[in-house]
Amino acid sequence: MPPNVSQRKISHQGLDISLEIIRARRKSLAIHVFPGERSTEVRVPLKCSWVDVDAFIESRLDWIADALRKLAAQPVESKFKRGQVHAFLGKGYVLEPCFGKSSVMLTPDQLWISCKHPESEAQIERVFLAFLRRESEAIFKERLAGCLANFPEPVSPTGLRVRRMKARWGSCSERGEICLNTLLIQKSPEVIDMVITHELCHLVHFQHDRQFYQLMDRAMPDWREREVALGAEIEPGSTEAEVRQPEQLSFL
C-alpha cells in the first residue's frame, strides 16, 4: 500500500463501511462513495491531523451510509457479456468469450477471452484486467520514454508504476514517482501521452497553477483537445462508442 494511503473499517447504521484515506496535496477534505464493493475514499491534505480527519469522517457518517444505500439500490450494469464492446488503445473490440486456458487475443474487430468458465462474467473480467495490466506495463514505459524525449524541461521521474485506480488516470508523488491507471491502456496513444505529459509537468510544478498550464501548453499545444478525447472514447462494456462518467457520489 502506498505510504500516503491508509485503510479503516467502521460500522454505522448496520453497515460495514470500508474507508480508504488518501493524503495528497490539496486544501480541502472530500469523501467519494463508489458503487459495488469499492472502498469509500476520504481525500485529505498531506499535513491534516488525524484528529481533524477523524472528526470529518464522524460528521459525515450519516451521509456516507445514505449514499451507500442509494448506490446499492441502483441496478448493476453487466459489462462482460458476449457482444459488448471493450477498448484497447482507443479501438473498440466486440467481446467473444470462449472455453480454454486463460488468455486474451485481439483480432481486427474482436476480443477473444478464453477461460475455464466463459459463462462467468467475473472470470472474464479477471482475465481481461490481467491482460490490461501486462500490456500497460510495457506500453506505458515506451510512451513515457517518447514523452520525455519531447518534453521542454529536463525532468527525471524516479519511477513508473501502474495500478488500477478508482478516480484518477494518473498521479505524481512528491518523490517524483509517476503512477498510471491500468485502464488508461484502453485509451488512444495520443490520450495516453497527454496524461503522461500532465504528470511530467507536475515534476516541475506540483500544483495546478498558471505556470503548470503554461508548461502544458509548451509541452503539448493540443493537450486540451486530447483531454476532451479522454472523455469521448469507448466506454468499457458498452454496445456503442459512447462514454459515461463513472457513477459516484462525492462530498466536498
Image (tube, rainbow, N blue to C red):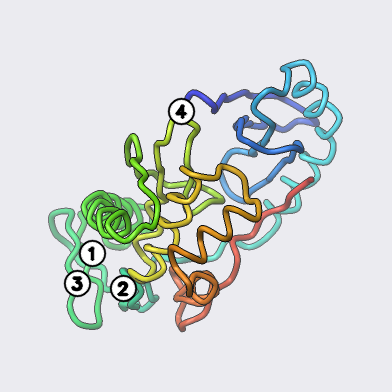
Mark positioned earlier in the residue sequence (4 or 1): 4
Residue type of the residue flagged with mark 2: Leu
Please tell me which residue lies in front, 26 or 215: 215
Residue type of the residue flagged with mark 1: Ile
When the figure is inspected, residue 230 is found, relative to residue 135, above or below; the finding is below
Per the rendering, the mark at residue 204 is none
Please tell me which residue lies in front, 175 or 100: 175
Q: What kind of element bears circle 1? A: strand
Asked whether, in this view, residue 175 is left or right of residue 106, the answer is right
Residue depth check, mark 3 versus mark 4: number of the one nearer the observer: 4
Residue with the mark numbered 3: 106
Q: x%, y% of residue 40?
A: 64, 39
Residue with the mark numbered 4: 2
Please tell me which residue lies in front, 143 or 188: 143
Residue depth check, mark 3 versus mark 2: number of the one nearer the observer: 3
Q: Quadrant of residue 44?
A: top right
Q: x%, y% of residue 182?
A: 37, 52
Please tell me which residue is depicted at 34% across the width and 78% down the height of the picture: 92
C-alpha distance separating marks 4 and 1: 32 Å
Total marks placed: 4
Residue type of the residue flagged with mark 4: Pro
When the figure is inspected, residue 141 is found, relative to residue 5, above or below; the finding is below
Q: Is residue 93 visible from the viewing direction of this image? A: yes
Mark positioned earlier in the residue sequence (1 or 2): 2
C-alpha distance separating marks 2 and 4: 34 Å
Please tell me which residue is depicted at 77% across the width and 40% down the height of the picture: 64
Residue with the mark numbered 1: 113
Residue type of the residue flagged with mark 3: Leu
Residue with the mark numbered 2: 95
Contact between marks 1 and 2 (CB within 8 A): the answer is yes
